[in-house]
Image: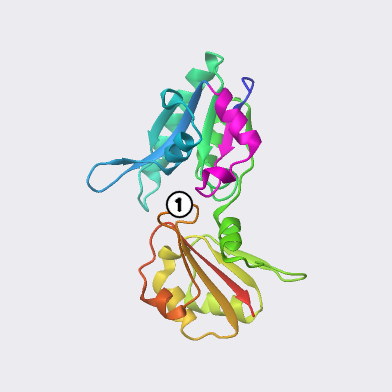
């Protein structure tokens, strides 16, 4: 592990869903870089750190880095650059370095900014796979996301009502990763479609916050939080 900076995927939030390989890498790390955010009242929040502590990782090896939560990504990109510079210093000391990411580190993960910066510095990286949120969500609902020749379309968040309806009418299975970014457009489309299964999730993997429903009226009445997800399938 010391020859590489290891990006470790933590899965969707349930510590029991992390792979044995990922756990071993965390246990061997000299330092673990872990993303955090600051709440509106100034509290430091880190779901990733919570997972690590549940896995009995020593808190002394965990180093939090702040990720600004804003649509203006310039501040976050600067933060990732600074993290890469910090990692470079640790790497020069031959430390075993892990960088953690929720879900899978190679699937819509902002850690790619850090990875790209390290590659530009000729620092070798490796990635340990994890379970992304939509896979864990499908398991929670006990559904098959796509069958046989069905196509699966993954939307990172922003989509118009017309575009969504066209994809549904084409018979595609659809995953919307951050529906809060297009909440009104999605609800408008949902009000005019039928013969589909609509599965709505919040905080999958966090047992005390986990929420799942197929009730379209409950979905439309609900405010979509940041950690929400939709799966739409043919019936």
- Judge whether residue 119 can be spotted in this image: no
The quarter in which the N terminus is drawn is top right
Task: Kindly identify the residue that appears in the image at 40 percent across and 47 percent down.
Answer: 73
Horizontally, is 129 left or right of 101 in the view? right
Horizontally, is 64 left or right of 30 in the view? left
Q: Which x, y percent locates residue 48? A: 45, 40
Given the current orientation, which residue lies at the most extreme top position? 93
Given the current orientation, which residue lies at the most extreme right position? 148
Q: Is residue 195 above or below residue 183?
A: below
Q: Which x, y percent locates residue 181? A: 42, 63
Q: Which x, y percent locates residue 223? A: 35, 68
Q: Is residue 40 above or below residue 80?
A: below
The magenta stretch spans which residues? 6-29
Q: Is residue 11 magenta?
A: yes
Q: Nearer the viewer, residue 195 or 205?
A: 205
- Judge whether residue 9 can be spotted in this image: yes
Horizontally, is 1 left or right of 91 in the view? right
Given the current orientation, which residue lies at the most extreme left position? 41
Q: Secondary structure at mark 1?
A: loop
Q: Quickly name the residue at label 1.
A: 206
Q: Quadrant of residue 61?
A: top left
User: How many labels were placed on the picture?
Assistant: 1
Q: Nearer the viewer, residue 107 or 112?
A: 107
Q: Quadrant of residue 150?
A: bottom right
Q: Nearer the viewer, residue 117 or 40?
A: 40
Q: Which x, y percent locates residue 91? A: 54, 19
Task: Kindly identify the residue that appears in the image at 66 percent across and 78 percent down.
Answer: 171
Q: Is residue 3 above or below residue 225?
A: above
Q: Is residue 71 magenta?
A: no
The quarter in which the C terminus is drawn is bottom right
């Amino acid at each position: 592990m010391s020859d590489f900076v290891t990006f470790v995927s933590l899965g969707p939030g349930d510590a029991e869903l992390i792979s044995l390989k990922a756990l071993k890498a965390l246990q061997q790390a000299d330092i673990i870089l872990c993303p955090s955010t600051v709440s509106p009242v100034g509290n430091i929040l880190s779901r990733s750190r919570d997972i690590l502590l549940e896995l009995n990782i020593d808190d002394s090896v965990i180093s939090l880095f702040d990720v600004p939560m804003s649509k203006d990504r310039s501040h976050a990109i600067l933060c990732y650059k600074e993290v890469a510079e910090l990692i470079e210093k640790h790497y020069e000391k031959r430390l075993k370095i892990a960088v953690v990411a929720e879900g899978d580190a190679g699937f819509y993960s902002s850690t790619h900014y850090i990875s790209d910066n390290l590659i530009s510095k000729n620092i070798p990286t490796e990635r340990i796979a994890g379970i992304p949120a939509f896979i864990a969500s499908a398991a929670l609902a006990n559904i098959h996301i796509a069958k046989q020749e069905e196509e699966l379309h993954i939307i990172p968040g922003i989509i118009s009502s017309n575009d969504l309806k066209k994809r549904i009418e084409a018979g595609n299975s659809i995953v919307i990763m951050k529906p809060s970014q297009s909440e009104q457009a999605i609800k408008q489309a949902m009000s005019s479609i039928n013969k589909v299964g609509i599965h709505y999730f919040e905080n999958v993997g966090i047992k005390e916050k986990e929420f799942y429903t197929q009730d379209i009226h409950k979905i439309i009445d609900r405010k979509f939080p940041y950690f929400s997800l939709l799966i739409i399938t043919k019936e």
